[in-house]
Amino acid sequence: MADNKLAQIDLLRERFRGVVLVEGDDGYEEARQVWNGMFDKRPLVIARCVATSDIIEAVNFSRENKLLVAVKGGGHNSAGKATCDGGIIIDLSLMRRVNVDKENNTARVDGGALLGDVDYETQLYGLAVSAGIVSHTGVGGLALGGGFGWISRKYGLSVDNLLSAEVVTANGELVVASETENPDLFWGVRGGGGNFGIVTSFLFRCAPIGQEVFSGIIAKKFENAEEYLTFHQEYVRTMPDEMTVWMVLRKAPPLPFLPEDVHGQLVVLVPFVYLGDQGQGEKLLQPIIEATESHGMFYGMSPWTAWQSGFDGLVSHGARNYWKSHHLKSLSPDCIKEILHYAERLPTDECEIFIPHMEGAPSRVAADKTAFVHRSTPFVLNIHTRWQEKGDDERCMAWARNFHDATNRYAHGVYVNFLSDEGKGRVRDAYSEEVWSRLVEVKDRYDPENLFQMNQNIEPST
Ligand SMILES: Cc1cc2nc3c(=O)[nH]c(=O)nc-3n(C[C@H](O)[C@H](O)[C@H](O)COP(=O)(O)OP(=O)(O)OC[C@H]3O[C@@H](n4cnc5c(N)ncnc54)[C@H](O)[C@@H]3O)c2cc1C
């Protein structure tokens, strides 16, 4: 490492309240890890921030030393955008405070918090923030891209519940983004990802969901999958926003309510959450139970925090992952056939085809209100390819690519947070033409040199 770079890093260390790590330091190996084991990168320096002043120092240091910058929130991004080779990771993972204001039903959340941090604190008051479904996902990346989960059909996306954000921009300035302060930036951070600066804290509106929700999983037999998917795509679209029912086609994990001989068999898992009275929820569930034969089921009132972490183990850190995704216009009969064709050829037992139903409150927000535009999509098709050995890379990735290509004709657009590294053109599919032009204007204003480019990048116009 050049002496002048080392000297600069020493200067950063002197001003920093958190920890500055370089290769060889204790903690460097751990801090450079991200969720997706495909990304084994070695940054020159890792700045582990503990306060906003650290973030400002790290941004100024990166800009002055012309370093490639990766910002790490939860490190969950499947495209590995929270790490880099040779540059700097501005690591927010020590900044995870959540403060709930129960009078105003809001939560102020640090930029490096995980979803579990938010759930535990808001649940003290029977509240929740609309976000994702795995507790070790970062709020930062999720909320900046959109953010949907079990309660978004009723309460909107994370971006729809964002009231304001504190942002450190590329020139090291700390600004507030809200409807009244820097509204162009506020519009951009609600869907445009981490392109415009580092969010030190988010202020979210909370939803009064209580501490238990009626929830569960029905495991449908795969032999009737075509019949079930045909029924499902129609029935779930008739449901009230309080009921969210999704599908996961995969090899059955060893769920305690399934007979042992079903473990490892191909099944259609139908998880659901109902925000309301159990009796009413059971009535809504009945047609699903009766639609086709099931291997087993489990449902009842569950603590929200338990439900929100119930799937964590299936997507733990470190495995190799390659995700492909698109929004589906509908689950047409031909599309269902294609999905089942690929389901029968899952390359490993850890792979899954995840089909959430999206319509509801998000679809009633005007498409230009935030930078998240694909609001009327009924279903998302997520191809979660997951394996352990490097030697399986080609086989697993080929399955995902072929599956994605085969279903492309049923698709329109994509959710930015589910993109892999798919090239500049593909990033634009997450937005409309009009929204893209507006995003470039916001980028020109807040990050004209493209300091923040380890993301699904919106390049400035110059
Ligand atoms: C297992 C799993 C489950 C998921 N479930 C859901 C789900 O239910 N709903 C959903 O909507 N999405 C879901 N996602 C997708 C998720 O939204 C993205 O992976 C998201 O990028 C995760 O954010 P992160 O902070 O953990 O990621 P990171 O990898 O840390 O960051 C992702 C991007 O955001 C930027 N970033 C992160 N924090 C900040 C910040 N504070 N300020 C500025 N930029 C920042 C990073 O620079 C990077 O470009 C899931 C992903 C995984 C892997």
Image (cartoon, rainbow, N blue to C red):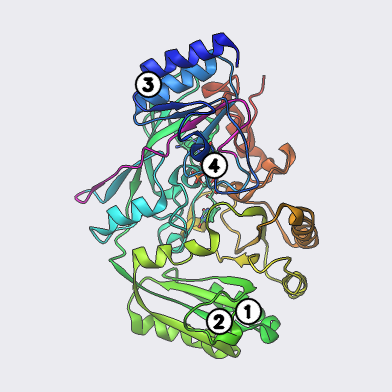
Separation of disc 4 and disc 2 at Cα? 34 Å
Q: Nearer the viewer, mark 1 or mark 4?
A: 4
Tell me residue 245's x, y (percent). Answer: 51, 72
Element assignment for label 1: strand
- 445 and 36: which is toward the camera: 36
Residue ID at (60%, 52%): 374
- Which of the two labelled residues, at mark 4 and mark 2, occupies the earlier sequence position? 4
Left or right, 331 with reference to 356: right
Are the residues flagged by discs 1 and 2 in contact, CB closer than 8 Å?
yes
Q: Residues within 10 Å of mark 1 (few under 14, many from 20)?
A: many
**Above or below, 416 relative to 152:** above
Left or right, 361 with reference to 35: left
Q: Nearer the viewer, mark 2 or mark 3?
A: 3
Q: Which residue is mark 4?
A: 33
Numbered circle sitting on residue 267 = 1
Amino acid marked by disc 3 = Phe
Asked if residue 81 can be seen in this view, the reply is yes
- Which of the two labelled residues, at mark 1 and mark 2, occupies the earlier sequence position? 2
Tell me residue 298's x, y (percent). Answer: 45, 82
Q: Nearer the viewer, mark 4 or mark 2?
A: 4
Numbered circle sitting on residue 440 = none
Magenta stretch, main secondary structure, is loop
- Which of the two labelled residues, at mark 3 and mark 1, occupies the earlier sequence position? 3
Are the residues flagged by discs 1 and 4 in contact, CB closer than 8 Å?
no
Magenta stretch, residue numbers:
81-103
Q: Residues within 10 Å of mark 4 (few under 14, many from 20)?
A: some
- Which of the two labelled residues, at mark 2 and mark 3, occupies the earlier sequence position? 3
